[in-house]
Amino acid sequence: MTVEFRYIGKSINKVDSVQKALGTAEYINDLSFPKMLRGGVLRSIYPHARILRIDTSRAERLPGVKAVLTAKDVPDCRYGVFIKDEVVFARTKVRYIGEPVAAVAAIDRETVQRALEAIEVEYEELPAVFDPLEAMRPGAPLLHPDLDSYFAIFPAVREGNVCSRTTIVEGDIEEGFKEADVIVEDRFTTQMTHQTYMEPTGAIAVVDPSGKIVVYSSTQAIFVIQSRICESLDIPMSKVRVIAPSVGGGFGGKIETNVQPLCAALALKTNRPVKIVLSREEEFMAMHPRHPAILWGRLGLKKDGRFVAKETVSIFDTGAYSDDGPGVAGFGTLMSRGPYRIPNLKLEGYCVYTNKVRTGAFRGFGNPQTSFASESLIDMAAKEIGMDPLELRLKNALVPGDHSVGNQVLKSVGIKACLEKAAQGVGWKEEKGKCRGRGIASVNHISGLYTAAALVRINEDGTVSLHVGTTDVGQGVDTILVQIAAEELGVPMEDVNLITRDTDAAPYTWATSASRLTYTGGNAVRLAAVDARKQLLHLAARHFESREEDFAVEDKRVFLKRSPEIGLTYRQLADISFWVKGGQIIGKASYMVESPPFDRSGFVGFPFGTMSAYIFAAQAVEVEVDKETGKISVIRCTAAHDVGRAINPHNVEGQIEGGFVQGLGYALTEEMAFDGGKVINPTLAEYKVLNAMDVPPVAAVIVEAYDETGPFGAKGVGEPVLVGVAPAMANAIYDAVGVRIKDLPITPEKILNAIKGEKGGSCSSHPLSGLLPGKS
Amino acid sequence: MKKRKIELNVNGEAHTISVPPQRTLLEVLREDLGLTGTKEGCSEGECGVCTVLLDGLPVRSCLLFAVDVRGRKVTTIEGVAQGQRLDPIQEAFIEQGAIQCGFCTPGMILSAKALLAHTSSPTEDEIRVAISGNLCRCTGYQKIVKAIRAASREAQRDVGQALR
């Protein structure tokens, strides 16, 4: 049955695009308040050091300086996502270059700068550790000797510098490998990369007349920021309000706290608004970039291509604080099977402290790292058994009725169609020239996680107020949610007043994260709209002394199905509800992802609750490699994504295209380079983000494997768009010139060295051999 | 430092302001004139979000001292639409889905505007060159290139109609 929709499935222009085209949209740095001060942060210059003395007196005496704060001025509280290990200011020691030691509020930026320079800090350097494998060795410098005493929100398995270890076992790994005819094994490494959203992060804190702290913030998650401000400064949530203006991109980097607690503390101290906006250099040295990883994997298969066993060890470098690290390591580990049937699994993930900037969430959340290893291994296996890599993937790909890791039954599974379409897009079966190669990678991800709530109010004139705590950071969720509400309520989109981005005005929604808002937020909005619609129908039925099921809604009106001329407009119904019967119609929904639950019998130290709404994708590239220079030219690329149903195809394509290009950067050019604990390329001149001339056309293909649990069948799309690009690229380069690059980014130099027969640094041995008891 | 008095023509409006010699055009636009449509992304001339037109040519306003552009014509995003009427480039950006977070959009539109003012029917390569100084992290440039192409076709149609 085809249902005709008015808004669903239509590429409707984004609801905020006119203001963005006009330049009138307001971002954090565009806001200012009377008597507003500027703030700045003094950051550690050592990767690991004891703080012996801080003298702020000279800074405090400077004219125009209104406050100088250090650890002694804030409560001794720790905050964090999974493990509460981080502090607003370093108290007794610093753990990375860039860690906040003091903060200043002054009348202008120049005075802030002078004050920061006038603060004296005496340090005693401590031995530091920068490599996660070194950090796991007995006797390595310990970043958090009190790790065991830190509160964790899940049963964390932790020891030494390992703040979290996740193990997932299914089947019998030893028997599985015994069954295998062929085993491929290798080791891979990936680099630290930065989200490089165009808008630098910032915040403004204002203490309102009632004493409440209002924090305007460039964030992906108003409620996360609210809760972190509260736990880090020991303030009740009733006294903190967080508002997000327009946000100039996030990609995961703006979920967690940055300067908001500092701004709040400075505003409380001065009783004046305080603004801090980070410089690009601070962005690189002190935000939440992507975890570098060391990835080892072993895949066993039969001669006919059937996968029988897989073992992985993934080591994530989380820097000085855990932040989202336990989640990244746990989720990356969960995704390590890939969208394939593999009966015997042992998947391990380690999240390890080092004296570098704390790493966090970045589009893909551990999946790009483990997928680089997994999808490279599959091509290596295909070569061993002499099978086409596409065919090998198709042979093992999940079909509806198969299970996730954790034994959830999967019903909406479009991976095979994605593989076929992506391969087709790069001419998989066509003849190809010399030094040309094609590569493909599969992706699985989730889009249902945690909770979202929504309220739908019918106003006096019959228009609609939609309250929802989601934060659009450019991906277009505002538009999607208005489309969903308008469709369910039978009102024009212009009639829906979206009230969002404000913790005082919208019900709780967890972060803009995990590709989850269309599915999780969409479900909440749809259910709230359905609830309001039911009440409208009920009111009309009572008015006409008839039954609800005899009525339908369309064009802001409830009418009798058999004689549509009989009915009441929403305005008329509002008149009744406001002045006669029932009071204001308010539809509401609190939606939680809780089914199907994981079978956790094989999970140890897994930091999440239930996840659902699996999304699938395949990304394929055709490249030409210049054997003389190592230069890679991308000839064609196609990404096919199973999104359940595309509520707004333009938005979906925008995610696919933009994410693919970010994936190209991850695969080929982007890398935060370190000298010890210091980022040595903290500028956009030295950190290479692809520009319009670097980027090939990307063909985006939408696959719709309707998900009965999603709003109108929809699932998510935000993250998988990046995940498969790097392995597809590595596979294409192998296909072109016969060298396997196991270390990201894939630079011309690495290709040349490989062609010359010089191995890179990687080797195939188990990364933990000789390191932990029982590992050899 | 001693302030200097300068005259600036921004979006057709003359302004006389006193600025310290090291104050950038970006700071003057955003902080002295309140034209916050011009964005700040890196302050070192790499990202292009602060692009404005100086006598019709795209420049990075974070790299220019305001005193050095005295007397010249500056166009910011606020000067692109004709009152309530959107410029065809703005319309095309909206229609083609070329706007995501919107932070690069003002600079991107101004670079496109400069291109189309000089090249009515640019090739895809010419478009990519023209916006290569404007980084975008959301769209992968795909729909932006499409939008500029659509706007150029739109412009040609207008010219064609005018000639008939």
Image (tube, coloured by chain):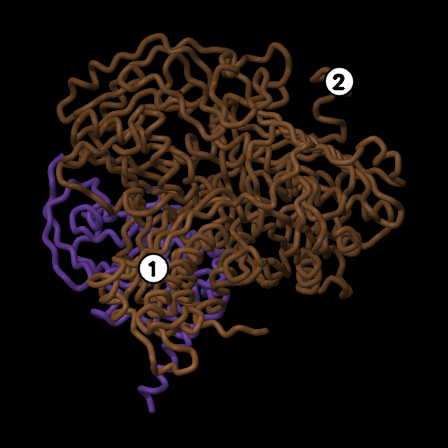
- The residue that mark 1 highlights is A16
Q: Which chain is brown?
A: A
Chain to which mark 2 belongs: A
Secondary structure under tag 2 reads: loop
Residue occupying image coordinates x 41% and y 70%: A547
- Which of the two residues, A704 or A739, is positioned nearer the viewer here? A704
* Distance from Cα at disc 1 to Cα at disc 2: 56 Å
What kind of residue is marked 1?
Answer: Asp
Chain to which mark 1 belongs: A
Q: Quadrant of residue A17?
A: bottom left
Nearest to N terminus: mark 1 or mark 2: 1
- The residue that mark 2 highlights is A774
Image quadrant in which the C terminus of chain A is located: top right
Above-or-below relation of B98 to A274? below
What kind of residue is marked 2?
Answer: Gly
Above-or-below relation of B158 to A739? below
* Residue B54 visible in the snapshot: no
Q: Position of residue A252 (x, y in %)?
A: 46, 42
Residue occupying image coordinates x 87% and y 44%: A302
Q: Is residue A64 left or right of residue B151?
A: left
Secondary structure under tag 1 reads: loop
Image quadrant in which the N terminus of chain A is located: bottom right
Residue occupying image coordinates x 70% and y 22%: A768
- Chain B, chosen colour in render: purple
- Which of the two residues, A141 or A231, is positioned nearer the viewer here? A231
